[in-house]
Amino acid sequence: MIKRVCLAAVLSCCVVFSVFAGCPSALPTNDVKFCSSFKSVATCYCTSSGLPSSMCQDMSALYSRMISVFGSLQKACEYQRYTSPQDCMDNWNCYLYGGVDSRGRLCSSTKKACQ
């Protein structure tokens, strides 16, 4: 249960609004600066949740941990309460895989993955 609580804070990387950790919001998925924004926000929420900073810097490791705890991206995004599950999934999918989000927007304006 403690792992789930800590991970919930990490999932808030696509936050629309939060007063608790003081972390900023990620830019929209189609913004040219989405990649750096997403990583910065994910890192902020990850470290403020108490996870080791080494894990917080590696988005692939962070994603793998989410999947191991929750079983799927959808379940992980449904668990967090900082943004809609769909925005959370769009953010992770754009960051890791590129393409277009659920609204048809080009990820990072180029369709390329961030990594």
Image (cartoon, helix red, strand yellow):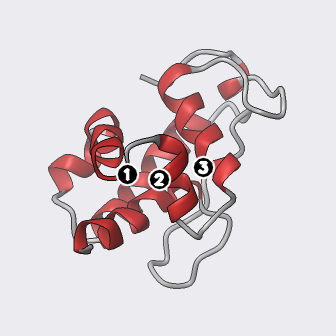
Q: Are marks 1 and 2 in contact (CB under 8 Å)?
A: yes
Q: Amino acid at mark 2?
A: Ala
Q: Nearer the viewer, mark 2 or mark 3?
A: 2
- In this image, 71 relative to 109: left or right? left
Query: In the rendered image of this protein, does residue 3 appear above or below residue 112?
Result: below
Q: Is residue 10 above or below residue 31?
A: below
Q: Residue at x 52, y 65 (%)?
A: 80
Query: Cα distance, mark 3 to mark 1?
Result: 14 Å
Q: Residue furthest bottom?
A: 20
In depth, the one of 63 and 17 nearer the eye is 63
Q: Residue at x 37, y 44 (%)?
A: 71
Label 1 to label 2: alpha-carbon separation: 5 Å
The residue under label 3 is 88
Please state the horizontal and vertical placement of residue 77, each as a whole percent of the image: 54, 53
* Point 53% across, 38% down: residue: 92
46, above or below 96, in the image? below
Are the residues at dot 2 and dot 3 in contact (C-beta closer than 8 Å)? yes
Residue 35 in percent (x, y) is at: 53, 35
List the residue tagged with mark 1: 70
